[in-house]
Image (cartoon, coloured by chain):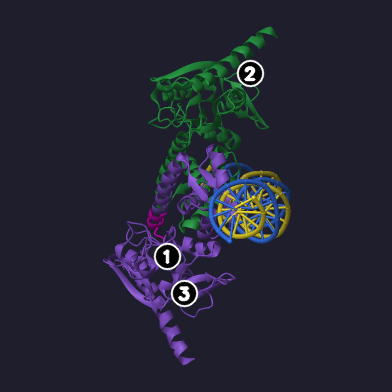
Chain colours: A green, B purple, C blue, D yellow
Amino acid sequence: MEFRLLRYFVAVVEERHFGRAAARLHMTQPPLSRAVKQLETDLGVVLLHRSATGVGPTPAGNALYAEARTLLEQAERARARVTAAGGAVTLTIGTLADSGGETGTRLAATFRRRHPEVSIRFREADFTDPTTGLRNGLVDVALTRSPFDDTGISTRELRSDPVGVVLRGDDRLAGRDTLCLADLADRPWFQLPEGTDPVWRTYWNGATPVGERPAGPVVRTVHECMQAVLWNGTVGIAPLVHVLPDGLTWVPLTDMPPSPLVVAWATEHGSPLIRSFAHIAIDAYYRSAHESLER
Amino acid sequence: MEFRLLRYFVAVVEERHFGRAAARLHMTQPPLSRAVKQLETDLGVVLLHRSATGVGPTPAGNALYAEARTLLEQAERARARVTAAGGAVTLTIGTLADSGGETGTRLAATFRRRHPEVSIRFREADFTDPTTGLRNGLVDVALTRSPFDDTGISTRELRSDPVGVVLRGDDRLAGRDTLCLADLADRPWFQLPEGTDPVWRTYWNGATPVGERPAGPVVRTVHECMQAVLWNGTVGIAPLVHVLPDGLTWVPLTDMPPSPLVVAWATEHGSPLIRSFAHIAIDAYYRSAHESLER
DNA sequence: AAGCCCGATACCGCGTTGGTATCGTTGCTG
DNA sequence: CAGCAACGATACCAACGCGGTATCGGGCTT
C-alpha cells in the first residue's frame, strides 16, 4: 500500500470514471486500471464495482477512500513540518486543475533563477476549491481564477481570459465564431457541488444556459468537463484553452463575463518570497502586455 | 514521499546504522543509502549526519522520524479497517524480529492449504515487543518467545530452543562445545531499553554475564545483536540459529534457561481461525517430535 | 441490431529497484 | 604513526515495475 496507489484510488472514486481520473492524474487509463486492481489484490478486497457507465465504491472502497484522504493530507502536512524543521525554504504553488499550470511552470522557472536556494513544489487542486489550499496552509501562493470569497486573501489580476466552450470539430456549432449560452441549452453541463465557495459557485453555475438547470448529467470538475468534451461529444465550458487535442475547437461565449487569472496568497502569510513570486507574475504580464503594445 | 522510503528511514534512525537497518529490512546497504538520499533530495533537507561510527538524525530527521512513525501506524490501521469493511478474512501473523519467521512461513503454507480463502500477512515486530502487536490488535496471532507478561494472552509452547552465542570462526572461544556467561564477561552485550515488558526484560537482561551491567555498548535489537556479531567480532546472544553466515559458529550457553518458542493470541479475540492456526502449529511440532522419535 | 462508450487485457520500452564489487574516509590500535 | 577495520558512498548490472499504445469484450443506447 503505497501513497501512489492511494492517490490513484482517490482520483478514481472522486471522478467515478477511470478515464477522467486518468486525465486528472496526467496518465492514461490502462495503467490506472492495473494499479487499482493491484491495490485490491494487496488488500484482498474489492474496492470498486465496475459497470459500463462508470464505477462506484464498494463499502470497502468507501472505507479506503476516507482513510486514503486523511493519510494523504497528513502526509502533506508531515512534509511541510519536516522541511520547516530542516530550515528548507520551499514555495508551494497551487494551481486550479490545470488552469494556470502552464503559466505556473513558466513563472516558476524565472522564480528559480532569482531564488536558486528555494525549492518549488506544485499542488494541483480540485476545481471545487478556488483557493487551491491557501486557507489551510497547504499552499503558499496560488494561480487561480476570480471571483471567489477572498476574505483574508490578497489577489492580483494577471490577465483576463474569455470563457468559451470546447466542441468537437464535427459539431454543428463548431464553425461559429462566437456562441451564446442559449445555443447550448440542451447539452450536458457542468455544475459545482454544494459546499464549494458560494461566490465561485454562483459565478460558474451562472454559466448554466438561459438560467435553467443543466439538461444533462451534472459534471463536477474541469477535468471531467474537458473529458466530457473529449469523449461524449458534449460541450464543456472552459477559459481560454492553450493546447487543444486534434479535432476539437474552442469557441468564445459572448454572454459569459471573462474569467480573470489571478495570483493569490493568504494575506497574513505574505512573506518576502511570496511577494517576490507575485511580483514576478505581475511583471511577466506587464511586460507581455508591454511587448504586445510595441509589436 | 512513499511509504517504502519512510519505512527505510525509520529503520535507519532506529538502528543508527545503515548496515543494521539494511539487515532488519532484509536488504543490503547500498540501495538503502541511495533510498535515504532520494528521500533527502525529495524533501530538500538533510535528514542524517553521517560519520564513520554511524549515523544520527538531524533536527529535520527527528521531525520526519516522528511523522513517519505515526503515518506508518495509521496506514496499518487503515488497512485493517478497510479489509474489515470489505469482509475480507485476513490472518496477520506476528513474528519477533526474525525469530520464528522461518517457521511462520512454513506454518502459513499448511494454513493456506486448509483455509484457501484467508489471506495471510506477516508483521515482523521489534525485539522490544514480545507480543509483536497482539495487545493493540495489529496482529492476530504471534510466533514469539516466552517469558513475557501474558495477562490476557493465551500461549502454547511449540518447542524450546537452547540459548547460545554467535561467534566468529576465528574467535578464541569458537572451538568450545559449550560456554557459560562468565566466559563472555568483557564483551559488548545486548540489553533491552526501559519501557519494554518487564518480565521479558529481566529474562534477557538476566543474560548479562555474572550479574554485571554490560561492558560494551548497549545493543537494542536482535538484528543489531546479530549484526554486532557479524561486523564487530563481538558476541550476541541468540536462540538456536537456523542459517548462519559463513565464518560464524553458534555455541550454546550452559547457564541460560532455554527460550520457548510459543504461539500466542489475545484471549478475548480467539477466533476459530486463530485456533486453527494454533492447532496447526502445535500439530506440526507434535508430529515432528513424533517423527524424530521414530527415526 | 448497430454503434458507442467504458473498463480490461496484451504487449512493450524504459526507469527504478535491489544486487555485488569496490572505493574513500575515519577512528582505533599496536 | 602506521596499519587496519568498519562505515557510508559510489559504480555498475540484472530484473522487475510502471506507464505507454493498441485492442478486446460487454453493456447501454438508439
Q: Which residue was labeled with disc 1?
A: B96
Q: Identify the subunit bearing mark 1.
A: B
Residue positioned 51% across, 16% down in the render: A157
Q: Give above or below for B29 relative to B171.
A: above
Q: Is residue A244 shown in magenta?
A: no
Q: CA distance from mark 3 to mark 1?
A: 14 Å
Residue at the farthest left position: B151
Q: Identify the subunit bearing mark 2.
A: A
Q: Position of residue B198 (x, y in %)?
A: 30, 63
Residue B240, numbered label: 3
- Front in this rendered view, residue A186 or B116: B116
Q: Which residue was labeled with disc 2?
A: A177
Q: What kind of residue is marked 2? A: Asp
The answer to which of marks 3 and 1 sits earlier in the sequence is 1
User: Are the residues under badges 3 and 1 in a single subunit?
Assistant: yes
Q: What kind of residue is marked 3? A: Leu
Residue B30, numbered label: none
Q: Identify the subunit bearing mark 3.
A: B
Q: Position of residue A220 (x, y in %)?
A: 47, 34
What is the secondary structure assignment of the residue under circle 2? loop
Q: Give above or below for B198 relative to B9.
A: below
Q: CA distance from mark 3 to mark 2?
A: 84 Å
The span picked out in magenta is B79-94
